[in-house]
Image (cartoon, helix red, strand yellow):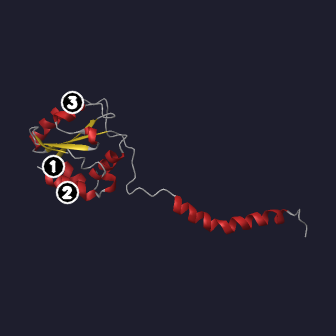
């Protein structure tokens, strides 16, 4: 045998890789990060340029005409749980319940430093975390505020949690 033959130089290496490949796949599976139950979308849903006071006033006017309630959604694009809440709100049946019964107003909170006065007005303690929701009647009266970070870990919750919330507070 000629030890300089190319096949003989690469065969041991190929054999080693062939033998190690199943182990490598197993190791990769064991140490791979656990898949997220719900992928973050990275969607732009909160706008720093918005005027939440004007948006709330317009929502109250519209809610009075349409006999709907208002959901104030405090959060930020950087918040993974806010992204998941948005995704759950747009799934069936939540999207239909939302459209038929509510007007959604998103309020961007920066890094807990924007629109703090609005959060305080509606008794939403954003310092505890977001997303945080408040529900108003069609006249703008506060009916509910999430004081205990109820959707703060929505990434580990099921979409039906949002459904139950919407059904509880619908007009």
Calculate the distance from the C-alpha at mark 2 to the C-alpha at mark 1. 13 Å
- Work out which quarter of the rendered image holds the N terminus and state it: bottom right
Residue drawn 48% across and 56% down?
33
Q: Is residue 136 left or right of residue 114?
A: left
Mark 2 crowd level (few <14, some 14–19, many ≥20, 10 Å Cα): few
Q: Are marks 1 and 3 in contact (CB under 8 Å)?
A: no
Q: Quadrant of residue 167?
A: bottom left
Q: Give x and y (percent) for residue 101.
A: 15, 49
Residue matched to label 3: 117
The residue labelled by disc 2 is 164
Classify 159 as above or below 76. below
Q: Residue at x 29, y 52 (%)?
A: 88
Who's the residue at 19% across and 53% down the image?
A: 165
* Residue lying at the far right of the rendered structure: 2
In-front residue for pair 79/101: 79
Residue at x 24% of width, y 50% of height: 150
Callout 3: few (<14), some (14-19), or many (20+) C-alpha neighbours within 10 Å? Answer: few
Q: Secondary structure at mark 2?
A: helix
């Amino acid at each position: 045998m000629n030890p300089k033959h190319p096949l003989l130089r690469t065969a041991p290496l190929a054999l080693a890789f062939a033998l190690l490949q199943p182990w490598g796949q197993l190791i990769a599976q064991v140490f791979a990060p656990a898949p997220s139950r719900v992928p973050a979308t990275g969607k732009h849903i909160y706008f720093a340029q918005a005027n939440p006071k004007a948006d709330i006033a317009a929502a109250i006017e519209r809610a009075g005409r349409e006999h709907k309630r208002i959901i104030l959604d405090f959060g930020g694009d950087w918040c993974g749980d806010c992204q998941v809440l948005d995704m759950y709100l747009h799934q069936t049946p939540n999207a239909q319940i939302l459209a038929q019964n509510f007007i959604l107003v998103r309020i961007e909170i920066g890094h807990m430093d924007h629109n703090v006065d609005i959060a305080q007005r509606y008794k939403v303690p954003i310092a505890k975390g977001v997303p945080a929701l408040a529900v108003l009647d069609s006249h703008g009266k506060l009916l509910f505020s999430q004081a205990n970070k109820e959707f703060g870990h929505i990434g580990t919750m099921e979409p039906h949690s949002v459904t139950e919330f919407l059904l509880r507070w619908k007009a």
